[in-house]
Amino acid sequence: MKLIQYADILSASRSGGKLFTDEKYVLTPLAKEALKRHNVEILSGGSSMRKIIIAGNWKMNMANDEAILLSKAVAAGVGMGEVKDRIAVMCPPFTALSSVAAGISGIKGLYLGAQNIFYEDKGAYTGEISADMLLSCGCSFCIIGHSERRKYFGETDETVNKRVKKALEKSLTPIICVGETLEERESSRELRVVKKQIAGALSGLSKNDIMKVVIAYEPVWAIGTGKTASPEQAQSMHAYIREQLAAIADGDVSQSVSILYGGSMTPANVKGLLECADIDGGLIGGASLKAEDFLKLVHFDD
Ligand code: 13P
């Protein structure tokens, strides 16, 4: 029997409002109260209720003043009080995290994420950003292993794994990016590539930890190119990723992990993608830089 404490609820509220447990549980009286106050939902016994996550990856865009304007416009239109099945996340550059956090604090269903994290706690690592620094800026999520970081900054499955472990240790929800290049798809290696990335990213994690991660399937050939994967292509890879999660952990765990699609997602194609059984949201680049488009993605079914 697991004892769920106040601190567990607080940490779940920071990372999307879901608390997973694969055991029977009891709540401390304080935790019971916090559950209501912070609108946290407990998912137990491999519940398959997955939240839809619409996350904007701003990449290296938006200086502080622009970031404040964009985040305020999103905050004004997000109106998630009534929409309980989804959350929105904005991932600005590090330099804008604090100012965006100030503008969105208290807005229901709207969370802050970072675009990377370093795996050491502190010290002589010039230019790096620690988990505690992200937490102190109000982050709940953290993108890890984006293909641009793998391509330009030497990120490997091993460093992705270290970052994922650090994020989980500090109760930040990692959004782990995987996806094949055009060359890999054209030579029919996409499944092998994604399987290796998933296994590498999750190596050494407990089932309980795997339940807390978010995966983003971002085929590299679809990023910033306007060539979105078709719903069939994306669904087929998402189902494969879920199979991998079931093999590494178990079926219940695989059913509880949100798997997002990323790569030229726009208001025009979001619906077709999100109607697929295994697509639980999006990680959006270009279209997250305009409040109007991002809000259309968040409310894709209106
Ligand atoms: P685009 O939506 O601009 O294709 O970018 C996707 C992406 O890389 C999100 O992380």
Image: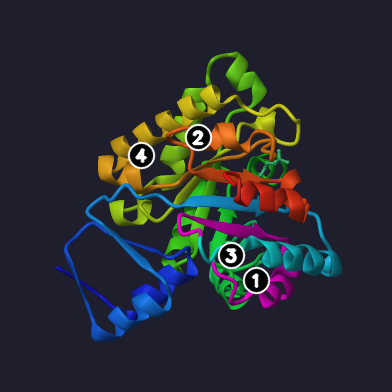
Neighbor class of circle 3 (other Cα within 10 Å; few <14, some 14-19, many 20+) is: many
> In the image, which is nearer the foreground, mark 4 or mark 3?
3
> Residue 192's x, y, as percent?
47, 24
- Which sits earlier in the primary sequence, circle 2 or circle 4? 4
Dot 1: what SS? loop
Mark 4–mark 3 distance (CA, rounded to whole Å):
27 Å
Marks 1/3 in contact by CB < 8 Å: the verdict is no
Mark 1–mark 3 distance (CA, rounded to whole Å):
34 Å
Mark 3 = which residue? 110
Question: Label 4 is placed on what type of residue?
Answer: Leu
Dot 3: what SS? strand
- Which sits earlier in the primary sequence, circle 4 or circle 1? 1
- Which sits earlier in the primary sequence, circle 3 or circle 2? 3
Residue 133 in sight from this viewpoint: yes
Marks 3/2 in contact by CB < 8 Å: the verdict is no
Q: Quadrant of ligand 1?
A: top right
Mark 4 = which residue? 245
> In the image, which is nearer the foreground, mark 2 or mark 1?
2
> Residue 232's x, y, as percent?
52, 22
Q: Is residue 165 above or below residue 134?
A: above
Residue 22 shown in magenta: no
**Measuring 36% from the left and 80% from the top, which residue is drawn there?**
34
